[in-house]
Image (tube, rainbow, N blue to C red):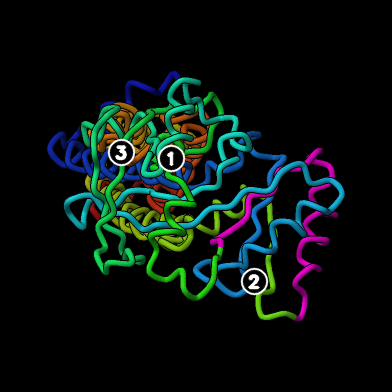
């Protein structure tokens, strides 16, 4: 640290170039922070909530439904506490851009999902209202819905028997997600499966369920119960795939794409470009100071000291820009999440992101400073002072 004043002076020897390089580094780590928050949001299904639940879907495709008769057979399996059902509705509100996470759910759905906190009086009204729907508080806030509103949702999949794809609903309850609930819980629109069955134009092909939610008597029985459920339909035309709720949520999210792979690919391209940019900056800075480095050696600085100062300059450049970028990401991410009306439930920039970011700053700084530092260390004093 005794050479810090020399390192700082060298770094800001060309202020304009340094500031533009810092701006590029800041932008790269701002993007890193935001993309890492996005990745974390899509992989947040690994909370302890729901460890006692399994999801049973078609083995072949999530859009292929299962027979309603399967519910009683699953319920009879030892270790099963309750069985509920759900169907993806594919609702949009007013505009195709306003996608609503809408599901037709069985009557016991709220008993299985304890993290949905709905007041008792609102639940009573919901149970008594055929077209009733309950919505998460974030979704209600997003569209300005309140209890008593009549809301038309257009299904992208299921028309009514009349042929109209716009379904009328009555908002009878607004629920809050309990602490630890899965990401997006407060963005859901839930309504009666019976209403869905009765009005659905596709009901003529049989009463079917999109997927079953299986509540276990103990989370320890998950593997044995899953195998038993899948054995019920083995070699049939409706073979099933039973998995934990966390695995199901992850596979559901991956229908949008492999978020982790997308984030890694983008950040790989960004950091590769950053290495080229900062590497060029460091190489040019050392070339401009060849005679100055020779003077330092002349007055007694060792080759290792010169090597260390140039390496430290590269690392300091990355750390300065990177810390500013991650700090800015910590400010921007909550603003983006709030501005989305709850559609993007981005977690704050956490310790893991900071540690990963700092490791990247040091690694990239050392990488871009390595070649210029090695050149400075091997510098011949006579040749450098002679301008050769």
Compare marks 1 and 2 and give the one earlier in the sequence: 2
**Callouts 1 and 3 close, C-beta under 8 Å:** no
Quarter where residue 166 is shown: bottom left
Q: Position of residue 33 (x, y in %)?
A: 38, 39
State the extent of the magenta-drawn residues as a range: 209-235
Q: Is residue 27 visible?
A: yes
At numbered mark 1, what does the secondary structure look like: helix, strand or loop?
loop
Q: Which residue is mark 2?
A: 59
Q: Residue 111 at x, y = what percent? A: 62, 34
Residue at 31% across / 58% down in the picture? Answer: 273
149 relative to 82, above or below:
above
Residue 105 part of the magenta segment = no
Q: Position of residue 242 (x, y in %)?
A: 70, 60
Q: Quadrant of residue 189?
A: top left
Residue in the foreground of this view, choosing between 364 and 42: 42
Q: Position of residue 34 (x, y in %)?
A: 35, 41
């Amino acid at each position: 640290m005794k050479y810090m004043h020399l390192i700082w002076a060298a770094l800001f020897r060309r202020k304009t170039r340094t500031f533009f390089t810092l701006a590029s580094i800041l932008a790269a780590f701002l993007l890193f922070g935001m993309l890492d928050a996005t990745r974390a949001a899509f992989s947040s299904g690994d909370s302890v909530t729901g460890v006692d639940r399994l999801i049973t879907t078609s083995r072949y495709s999530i859009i292929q439904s299962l027979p309603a008769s399967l519910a009683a057979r699953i319920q009879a399996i030892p270790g099963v506490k309750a069985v509920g059902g759900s169907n993806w509705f594919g609702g949009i509100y007013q505009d195709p851009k306003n996608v609503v996470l809408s599901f037709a759910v069985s009557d016991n759905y709220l008993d299985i999902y304890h993290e949905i906190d709905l007041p008792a009086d609102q639940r009573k009204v919901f149970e008594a209202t055929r077209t009733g729907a309950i919505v998460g508080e974030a979704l209600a806030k997003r569209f300005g819905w309140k209890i008593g509103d009549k809301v038309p949702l257009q299904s992208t999949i299921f028309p009514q028997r009349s042929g109209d794809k716009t379904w009328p609903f009555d908002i009878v309850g607004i629920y809050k997600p309990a602490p630890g609930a899965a990401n997006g819980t407060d963005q859901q629109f839930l309504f009666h499966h019976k209403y869905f069955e009765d009005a659905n134009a596709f009901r003529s092909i049989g009463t079917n369920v999109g997927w079953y939610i299986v509540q276990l008597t103990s989370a320890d029985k998950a593997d044995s119960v899953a195998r038993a459920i899948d054995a019920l339909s083995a070699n049939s035309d409706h073979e099933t795939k039973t998995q934990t709720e966390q695995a199901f949520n992850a596979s559901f999210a991956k229908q949008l794409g492999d978020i982790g792979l997308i984030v890694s690919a983008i950040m790989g391209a960004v950091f590769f470009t950053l290495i080229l940019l900062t590497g060029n900056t460091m190489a040019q800075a050392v070339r401009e100071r060849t005679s100055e480095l020779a003077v330092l050696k002349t007055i007694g600085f060792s080759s290792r000291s010169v090597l260390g100062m140039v390496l430290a300059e590269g690392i300091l450049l990355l750390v300065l820009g990177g810390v500013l970028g991650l700090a800015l990401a910590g400010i921007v991410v909550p603003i983006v999440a709030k501005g989305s009306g709850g559609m993007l439930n981005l977690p704050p920039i956490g310790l893991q992101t900071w540690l990963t970011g700092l490791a990247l700053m040091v690694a990239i700084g050392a990488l871009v400073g390595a070649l210029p530092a090695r050149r400075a260390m091997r510098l011949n004093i006579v040749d450098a002072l002679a301008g050769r």
